[in-house]
Amino acid sequence: MTLDLFASRPQPRTLIGAVENGQKRVWWEDRPPTPDDLAAHLEGRRLLGLVPDKAINLDLDRTTIQDLRPIVETLNSLQIPAYAGPGNTRGSKIWIFLEEPQEDLEALAKALAKLARLLLPEGHTVEGYPNGQHGLFLPLFGALNGQPRPLYEVWSKRPVVLPFQPRHADPEALRRLVRAVPFLEVALQKRPEGPRHEAGMAILNLAHRAGALREVAVLLGTERVFERWGLADSRTPESWREELSRLAEAAASPEYDHKRGVPFLKEAGLDPRPILILGEPAEEWPTPRPLEDLEAPLPPW
């Protein structure tokens, strides 16, 4: 494994960490990382970190790897390859690798962290990296100080083995997922007033116009929305997802007229403001009148 899986830029400084008796010490050294640093990390003797520009990390200090299921299921449903493992001292981490650096990588990481917080029950904290010049420790690939710290492929549940060659995510797929986050935010506000499938249809209509129909359909089918909308009174999670699939087909069909949108969401008691910038076209500004046609005279200054 080489460091260019994580960063394309040279690293002028090296982040080092050591865990002793459950306590982690962290410090920077003003030198580039060396092969010995990487070997010590891979052998689980010491931690090595850097500032990435080709990888996204979600750091979940209060979430065990078993509790990552809502996030993992969403990524798998959208065929976004990711890796997950326990944290260095607590919690868990999710990694997403990209083949090339992306200018909006920090924005993607921040939005994916927000998505993770929405998908998890209250009380879970999620930080997204890269974040400025904050250093980030590389994932562990087996153990730390003799304690198991495996990294898993989330789609297969198999542990990663060295040499490691990640499956890269499509940056456009990540951007579409990020575009879908405000729709989930609206859906989780409350149980809609009136028929819930009609509220779902209105959200999907707007998602289609925003170019994130598939992603929003997956998010509406998550456990958090199922519980928030009280759908267990008439549906199973499986039947709700099947219903969403049919609704998404209708939202994408040009033969389906009179598609409801923002006004209906307001009638259902939902605040559509998080998605207005995505779901509604901007109004055209009127042509300004010539100054000489104005009735009121201009001031002398």
Image (spheres, rainbow, N blue to C red):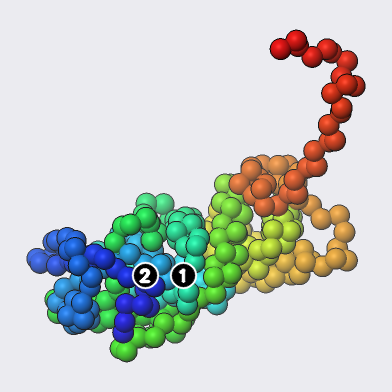
Indicate the position of residue 251 as horizontal and vertical percent values: 77, 63
Q: Which residue is mark 1?
A: 101
Instruction: Rate crowding at label 1 as few (under 14), some (14 to 19) or many (20 or more) other CA atoms within 10 Å.
Output: some
How far apart, in angstroms, are the residues tagged by discs 1 and 2? 9 Å
Q: Which residue is mark 2?
A: 9
Residue closest to the far right = 293
Indicate the position of residue 171 as horizontal and vertical percent values: 54, 70
Q: Do labels 1 and 2 touch, CB within 8 Å?
A: yes
Residue under the image location 56 percent in, 57 percent down: 181
Q: Is residue 173 above or below residue 289?
A: below
Residue closest to the far left = 21
Q: Is residue 39 above or below residue 212?
A: below
In the structure shown, which secondary structural element does the residue marked by tag 2 occupy? loop
Q: Is residue 295 above or below residue 42?
A: above
Residue under the image location 69 percent in, 55 percent down: 203
Dot placed on the residue nearer the N-terminal end, 1 or 2: 2
Looking at numbered disc 1 in the image, what kind of residue is underneath it? Answer: Pro
Indicate the position of residue 220 as horizontal and vertical percent values: 61, 61
Instruction: Rate crowding at label 2 as few (under 14), some (14 to 19) or many (20 or more) other CA atoms within 10 Å.
Output: few
Which corner quadrant holds the N terminus? bottom left
In the structure shown, which secondary structural element does the residue marked by tag 1 occupy? loop
Looking at numbered disc 2 in the image, what kind of residue is underneath it? Answer: Arg
Near-viewer residue (209 or 118) = 209
The reply to whether residue 139 is visible in this rendering is yes
The reply to whether residue 232 is visible in this rendering is no
Residue under the image location 17 percent in, 63 percent down: 29
Indicate the position of residue 284 as horizontal and vertical percent values: 80, 42
Which corner quadrant holds the C terminus? top right
